[in-house]
Amino acid sequence: MEVFSSPEDYLYNLHTCSPGEAKRIWKNSIKESFDFKCAYCGSREDLTLDHVVPRCAGGTDETKNLVSCCFECNKSKSQENWQSWYKRQSFYDPYKEERILNWQKQNTSNFSNYIETERARFILTRNNFVYKKLNNN
């Protein structure tokens, strides 16, 4: 389920459903982008979101600074630089590191620059607050 996450689109989501539901959908869309796995170790257990750059180090709550993360990795990483921490882990994977770096580079200021066409197959309908799958023909 894709949710558009630029500031303007987040406001649209707030108008089409409750604030709590909009936030839940937004968080779920980040986890979905990582196949419902921890971006670091690949676990599917106890998924949370991790601020790649911690807020205490100037990190934001923008989509590009949040990744799907298991509770154990989130706790272990804490407020440390993610790359320094990640490279010391037994599950370090350069492919996953590159994926996180690419995730951080996404341009969320322009919808067309970051929403993949094949993932934009779900839309919110204002009138009944349900998600409808578009025909993938």
Image: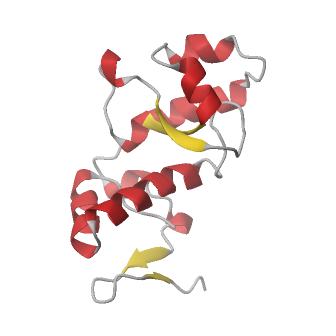
* Residue at image coords 37%, 60%: 4
Would you place residue 81 above or below residue 37 in this image?
above
Would you place residue 9 above or below residue 102 in this image?
below
Quarter that holds the C terminus: bottom right
Q: Position of residue 45 (x, y in %)?
A: 69, 44
Q: Which colouring convention does the figure follow?
A: secondary structure
Q: Position of residue 60 (x, y in %)?
A: 31, 32
Q: Position of residue 36 (x, y in %)?
A: 64, 51
* Residue at image coords 24%, 52%: 7
* Residue at image coords 63%, 18%: 86
Which residue is at the front of the view, 72 or 115?
72
Which residue is at the front of the view, 92 or 71?
71
Give the number of callouts: 0
Residue 89, image quadrant: top right
Left-right relation of 1 to 12: right
Residue 5, image quadrant: bottom left
Left-right relation of 123 to 1: left
* Residue at image coords 67%, 13%: 87
Would you place residue 105 above or below residue 27 in this image?
above
Q: Position of residue 57 (x, y in %)?
A: 33, 16
